[in-house]
Image: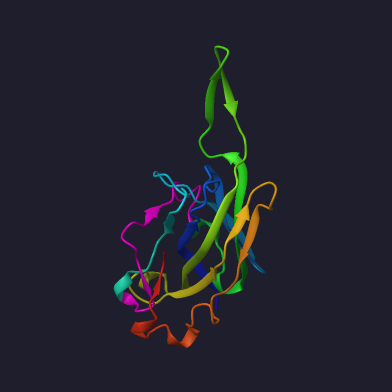
Amino acid sequence: MVSLLRGFLVSIETCDDPRSRTDTYVYLGLSGRRGGGEFALDSLEEDFARGTVTTLRAGDLPSPESSAFWSLPADVRPIRGDRDTNHPVTRGIDLDALDHVYLRKSSVPLRYRYRRQAGALMNVADDDDWKIGRVSVLLFGTEAGHEADYPRGRYTSRVFHRSGELWLGTPHGMQVLIPPAWDSALGIPPDSAGVDDDRFRLG
């Protein structure tokens, strides 16, 4: 049965390194045998600053009380964009057919920076290096025919997670794959999602 993506939560740790930060566009990508897409991870606040954990949400999320599996951080922020431009519901992504999730950093500044030199404003479009740590992604969907039950009723979910420090940038590579989390990294097998001690906490 097809399970269409309705929303997601993503948590990204930026390491506390003097050189680590980014104000370029960052994308969450979903790819599978029935298609996929990318989402720009841009909120109204400053994201991906040195030594911080950025937690963002997009689309329609199930209500936390309907599951003992996940918890919503207090400082989660919505990504920018409406249903036509940056919303999971409009992409038609089959959650069950996803093969992998990735994080991609661009070299284009999110907000164009300028500096004054010799009386003229010059565009500063330099790339920057970004050192990341833990990355966790929770994807939520609903089975076809059960749309009316969402977000307070029946839903499906998938978890992707990676840990370990990694540089992203022009000298290092711009993309990293985020593997499924059903392994020893979290210790949460698929059939234990209802166990209260196994709540997946972002951040």
Looking at the picture, the colour scheme in use is rainbow
Is residue 47 rendered to the left or right of residue 62? right
Residue 92, magenta (yes or no): no
Task: Where is residue 95? Give x, y as percent.
Answer: 54, 70
For the N terminus, which image quadrant? Answer: bottom right
198 up-or-down from 159: above or below:
below
Magenta segment includes 69:
yes
The spot of residue 7 in percent (x, y) is: 45, 62
Res 46 → quadrant: top left
Q: Position of residue 167 (x, y in %)?
A: 61, 55
Q: Residue furthest front?
A: 18
Region rendered in magenta: 66-87
Q: Main secondary structure of the magenta part?
A: loop
Q: Nearer the viewer, residue 75 or 27?
A: 75
Q: Is residue 97 visible?
A: yes
Is the residue 116 above or below the residue 5 in the image? Answer: above
Instruction: Kindly identify the residue that appears in the image at 37 percent across and 86 percent down.
Output: 195
Which residue sits at x=56%, y=64%? 93
